[in-house]
Amino acid sequence: MAQWAADAQWRRRAAREAVSTNLSRLLEIPAEDQAAVGRDVFRNFARYLVEFFAIRRPETPALAIEGGSHLERCRALGRGAILLSGHLGNWELGAVFIRRLGFPVTLVVLPHADPRTDRLFTRQRQRCGLNVIPLGEHSMGCCLRRLKAGDLLGVLGDWDVTGAGLPVPFGSGSLTMPRGLAVLSLRSGAPVLPVFLIREGRWAFRLFIEPAIWPDGSETGDAAVRSLTRRYADVLERYVRRFPEQWLMFHEAIQPLGSGLEAGPPRPTRSWRADRRGWGQVPRARSPEPSAVRR
């Protein structure tokens, strides 16, 4: 049923073309593969919804964890941290699994336009032991208090909804990321840990936890915000390139490079098929980092 509904949505031109544009600016992807990957994006969105609302069922999902020691280091420090994720895999379940590991988790979420839908998602998160901070005028202060209390603060970093985001190189174009991630880290001193829950099969997942990205104090103000945000983007891009069929973005997230955005050093190009060859090919982070905002 979910797959049938996803295929029906895939036939809608606007969303399909937005997904196709994102894929073309992200990957060197053969034309014959692009439609198949695009269709899988819609199917994975349907799976994400089914999984999230069925997570409290009796059966236990299969979960493999890579990089769990990075979370444990934060616990040992006795301080909060910012979890950076994106609309990749199943970010909601990723937060639930981390909560089940014994960590207090608070999510920064964008309220849904429909109040009934918003209440539905909020209730499900709370039933799973997650705290929620709606994105809005007072959310920065709430986030700082939760970090001070030792919470892990979950934020989605691949979509800026404030209108004041920071464009960063991403694929062959640019992605606008929220400035709030770096601002939170700089103001609180909390590290950012990139975290991604990737679907490997039916009720089978792998949780990737990257090393923490710390503000190092070598830069201040807007320069520090820009530098940190680019580091977050580098980690996010590696995972989106690796799992493009699980990046659930249905608007034109990757824009053409603008005249005011420097592309930076050339990025290595790898074919989509080569990127699918085995877990070991996910490059390790060059330094400790991550965080995100809900759709």
Image: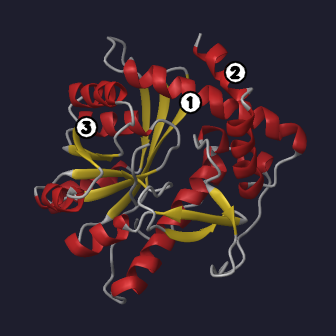
Which residue is rendered at x = 33% and y = 29% of the image? 121
Real-space Cα separation, disc 2 to disc 1, in angstroms = 11 Å
Mark 1: give few (<14), some (14-19) or many (20+) Cα within 10 Å. Answer: many
- Could you tell me which secondary element the residue under label 1 belongs to? helix
Q: Is residue 9 or residue 4 the one in the foreground? A: 9
Provide the residue designation for mark 2: 7
Provide the residue designation for mark 1: 45
Real-space Cα separation, disc 3 to disc 2, in angstroms = 33 Å
In terms of sequence position, does the residue under pointer 1 or pointer 3 come before the other? Answer: 1
Asked which quadrant contains residue 288, the reply is bottom left
Q: What amino acid type should be assigned to the residue bearing mark 2?
A: Asp
Q: Where 183 falls versus 74 (above or below)?
A: below
Asked which quadrant contains residue 74, the reply is bottom left
Which is more foreground, mark 1 or mark 3? Answer: 1
In terms of sequence position, does the residue under pointer 3 or pointer 2 come before the other? Answer: 2
Whether residue 277 can be seen here: no
Q: Quick check: marks 1 and 3 in contact, CB under 8 Å?
A: no
Which residue is rendered at x = 36% and y = 64% of the image? 181
Point out residue 7 in the picture as x, y percentages from the top left corner: 70, 21
Mark 2: give few (<14), some (14-19) or many (20+) Cα within 10 Å. Answer: some
